[in-house]
Amino acid sequence: MSDIHANSVAFVRTEEVPTAPPPSNAAGPAKWIKDNLFATPLNGLLTLVALYFIYAILSSALPWILGGIWNAPSLSACRDILDGASAACFAVLTERWNQLLFGFQYPDDQYWRPGLAFILLFIAAAPVLFFDLPRKLLAFTALYPFIAYYLLWGGTIFVPILALVGVAGGFMVYQRLVAGSFAAGFFGGIAAAFAIWYIGGLLIPDNASENAALSAVPSRYMGGFMLNMMLGVTCVSLSVPIGIALALGRQSSMPLIKWICVIFIEFIRGVPLITLLFVANVMLAYFFPPGSGVDLFLRVVIMITMFSAAYIAEVIRGGLAALPKGQYEAADSLGLDYAQAMRLIILPQALKISIPGIVNVAVGLFKDTTLVSVISMFDMIGMIRGPILASTEWNGVYWELFGFAALLFFVVCYGISQYSQWLERRLATDHR
Amino acid sequence: MTTLTDPPRESFNLSMLINDTRYRSTTFQVLAFILLSLSVGYLYSNLAANLQAQGLRIDFSFLGAPAGYDINQRLIEYTSQSTNARAAIVGILNTLLVAFLACLMATIFGVLAGVLRLSKNWLVSKIMAFYVEIFRNIPVLIWILIIYGIMTVVLPGPREFRGDNPTSTMLLDLFAFTNRGVYIPAPVWGPGSMVVVATFIASVIGVIGYRRYATKLLYDTGRLLPMGWPSLAIFFVPTLLMFFLMGMPIGLDVPALKGFNFQGGIKIGAPLIAIWFALSIYTGAFIAENVRAGIQAVSRGQTEAASALGLRSGRVMSLVVLPQALRVIIPPLISQYLNITKNSSLAILVGYADVTATLGGITLNQTGRAIECVVLMMLFYLTISLLISAVMNVYNKSVALKER
């Protein structure tokens, strides 16, 4: 055939022509810009508007930030240095750094204690957050609440040790009895822990905290970002188990239990957190035995925990409802009782589905810890609005302080939500 | 012949209360009831003992006593001699006002940002993603304080509008943005203005009627009447005609500087604007995510099928995508509205007199009736949220997929 063509056609190409590169407007950055920024006239207009918007913000914000003064004793001194130029006075951050982080009453020479507790928090949280780490690290997580309590509040070391012994004793009783029935183990464990705490409480001498290794710091001295962290971490970790119990209770076939849970959840979800904080501030003290004097921090922790437990319960209820009915039936047909079925079959799956929701609640709760500034606790926002903005040196420095608070909260909350997305991908075991 | 006999009756013993499923749930409920009564009784006895010790008792008569404080922002008549109950009602109305305004504006922000985030324009969608992340991850409290700061620190004071060469001027000579609030013109209803208003309402009904008729005609006969221009004409022409026929009865009361402050017009106080704007822009970020999720939940095939039928892209959106997306968008949207209502309680931070600031703030502090005030405040918020969830349930029922 080719012979014939060789005679009838003037030219036959024998080698392949190398592919030519696409024209410059159909590839590379030019094409990307055309497709993504100037696809249609309207689109082009939008791009120009957006560019102008970015320019307007950056042209005023960048000089303000970059020209900021980091070293000045007061706002007037800072204005003198600036000499009429418009720039930030970040000096307030360096000057009041410790107040922003620890509040204005925490003893100066003890700042290393909350700092150490904060660093240890990462080690304690790591095995909970990342499943690949060795499981033995969980032992440290279990110890962390007692260590952190001792570091932050100080006083006699017997209190955290007694608490730890109580929990350990309760756990041992639970292990002993759980083979018989879960309820027996659970309530037996709680009873044992309380018995140990009660007996131990009688043994600790009253003046034990007077010359303790770490001086005692009352909780009204806690403040700044530390208070936000303490409230956030404590309330979230306490509210997850309570939320699980409430969610299971709401699903229960026993009408009384179900209605107690429904009324609790709907009541808490129906009122703003600030009214619950008012309850903690002015009303809750009436419900404790006369003269018990439960401090404000504990009252606030109780109310915020109730608040987030109700929201977490709703998230977990969603997870429970999303499980196919076959899972419940399969557990029943294996002869598992209620506690076993929940612990081994239902909850592991339901919790997995609920993780993104729980993390959302946690982020929301962490943001809401700023509300305690309304009931005159000196958290970060309370510090800014109270002692710092009211001082003669720094009266009038709004943007630097609020900008710093915003940045700090953004870093934490954005970090948590990124973690949640990573976890969701990680836990996706269904091969779709 | 054999007789059937009953199986031997088991005698009842105590362990059956726990181990027999027939009795177990009753046992647990009785236990729970006893525990509940014990703890309620314990709390109540503590409460009674504490109240006794302080010589207090639960008493709502303080609501009838004069409040003794002033409220700047109010929708109904109120003086410092009015009762505490009236102060609470002023607060409730203020809460509802700011919640309503913020819901409206948050929806606008949210829909805009949600749709623009799906834009094919890379820059615009990135800016919107930035907006959503920034506002979702920073506490609303900080936003309220920042916006209140902008209102009070950056905006000029009224005296800067004075003199021959003022440093600030009014926008269009109608609006004045000052650090005390925004002054806008107020309408003045002259004689005959009711006729104009009636004409306006009638033309709104006319527009709806015309569009209904046109749709019916389209479905019945296939004839397509023009929609846009006739609607606009019906909307504007009769009202404008009537306005001039009656001799322009509706005027504007423009705010003007008198002495050291603006007089006339309507004053929207800086606290109201701060809380309104902060709640809208914060919740708008959440609504944007809901809107985006809703639109993405409509499968691509629906859009493609609609364009295969020859619908233009605007109609694809309005006839096919939106009706399906709304089913996904509206339930979370309503719970965002609920959040706005609850977050409006933060108004107390900037001194806006909502129910938390009047009943739960000043009244509580002046009368010392902590329990009564907090309980009343909670009841109010509970009622609102139960109402909103009732609305949501009705809506969910009405849009639930009608399955075979």
Image (cartoon, rainbow, N blue to C red):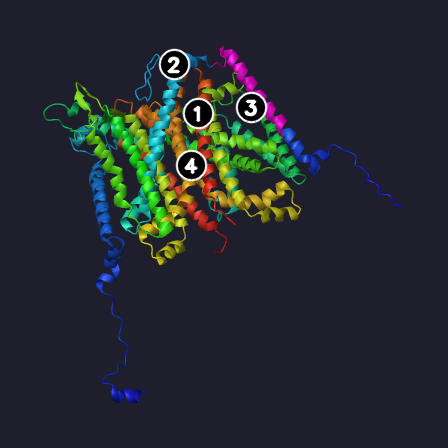
Among the two numbered marks 1 and 4 on one chain, the one whose residue lies closer to the N terminus: 4
Residue at 22% over, 43% down: A53
Residue B235 in picture, x, y percent from top left: 27, 38
The residue stretch that appears in magenta: B32-59
Chain for disc number 2: B
How much space separates mark 1 and mark 4, taking CA atoms? 17 Å
Chain for disc number 3: A
Residue B339 in picture, x, y percent from top left: 40, 33
Chain for disc number 4: B
For disc 1, the neighbor class at 10 Å (few under 14, some 14 to 19, many from 20) is some
Q: Quadrant of the N terminus of chain A?
A: bottom left
Is label 3 on the same chain as label 1? no
Q: Which residue is mark 3?
A: A204
Q: Which residue is mark 2?
A: B83
Per the picture, the main secondary structure of the magenta-coloured stretch is helix
User: How many numbered discs?
Assistant: 4
Is label 4 on the same chain as label 2? yes
> In this rendering, is residue B48 above or below A31?
above
Dot 4 amino acid type = Ser
Q: Which residue is mark 4?
A: B335
Residue closest to the eye, A55 or B339: B339
For disc 2, the neighbor class at 10 Å (few under 14, some 14 to 19, many from 20) is some
Dot 1 amino acid type = Phe
As helix, strand or loop, the secondary structure at mark 4 comes to helix
Residue at 16% over, 25% down: B160
Q: Which residue is mark 1?
A: B380
How much space separates mark 3 and mark 1, taking CA atoms? 47 Å
Is label 1 on the same chain as label 4? yes
How much space separates mark 2 and mark 3, taking CA atoms? 54 Å
